Image (cartoon, helix red, strand yellow):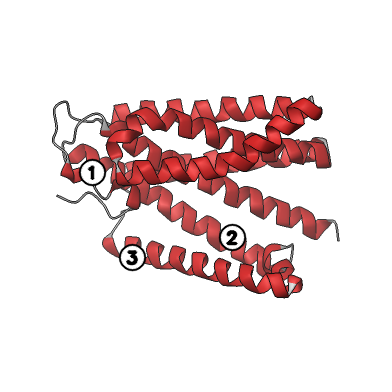
Amino acid sequence: MRVGNNTVFRRAGEYACSNPATMKGVTKKSAIMLITALLTAVLSILMMKSFSSLTGGIIVVGYLLSPILTLVLSLIMSFNPIAAKVLAIPYSILEGVSIGSICGLLLLAFGIEGALIAGLALIITLSFFLGATLLYSTGLVKVSSGLRRFAFIALFGIVISSFIIGILSIFNPAMGALFYGGSNLGIIVSIISILVAGIYTLITLDNAKRIVDAGLDEQFEWYAAFGIILNVIWLFWEVLSLLLRILARSDR
């Protein structure tokens, strides 16, 4: 049995069931992961506010290492879903460090405006996620195979174009500023990325439901929660990126 076509859920059906997973369990574990990430982010921001040579060094090292470690944990859980039971919380902590460090830097760079931008990005992200959850749970939006294919193609296009633009920007910084700065094109690209992340929010919810409907073991609740939180954090970064581009445009 194959459960969904998202990387996070692809191998779920290979495992036997003892106690079946439930949506209540997925929701509970998703909340635990989200709260863990938020608390870690707040702690990182507080450390940034008391920036010193010691805390500054810790934050810099943590920020440089956390994306690498986060990627490693994501890959492990993607290919070994059983590991999510152990690695989901460390993953949330690392994501919180990354988010808190960036938001702390925004606070240092822009003062209260930076804090407002980070807070607004969080509010928009949670609102977007709750809206998608409502639309999916009420059946107003269905996740079809066509929607999955469209989302995959769109994401693949974004990744490839970002890679190409990143390489070209090394030789022509103006191109990077055009796509990643506060230009009209940059804002459009950011909006498209948010829409794709929003579609994947629906897909991860549907994948979680498929895990439950397939009667897989309750340990996959952590696996499903990881997929959902991974998507929420991705959505947060895209929203924050859009707000920063709008800010850069307004400062011109």
Q: Secondary structure at mark 3?
A: helix
* Closer to the eye: label 2 or 3: 3
The CA distance from mark 2 to mark 3 is 20 Å
Residue designated by label 1 = 12
Horizontal and vertical percent for residue 124? 59, 43
Question: Earlier along the polypeptide chain: callout 3 or callout 1?
Answer: 1
Residue 127 at least partly seen: no
Check disc 3 and give the amino acid type: Arg
Going by the numbered disc 1, the residue's amino acid type is Ala
Query: Badge 3 local density, few (<14 within 10 Å), some, or many (20+)?
Result: few
Instruction: Give the residue displayed 74% in from the left and 27% down from the top.
Output: 55
> Between residues 73 and 109, which one lies in front from this camera angle?
73
The residue nearer to you, when weighing 130 against 238, is 238
Name the residue rendered at 81%, 29% in the picture: 53
- Mark linked to residue 149: 3
Separation of residues labelled 3 and 1 (CA atoms): 20 Å
Q: Quadrant of residue 245?
A: bottom right
Residue 104 image position (x, y, % from top left): 73, 35
Quarter of the image where one finds residue 251: bottom right
Residues at discs 3 and 1 in contact (Cβ within 8 Å): no
Give the residue number, with chain letter if any, for mark 2: 191
Disc 1 is placed on an element classified as helix
- Where 200 sits versus 117, above or below? below
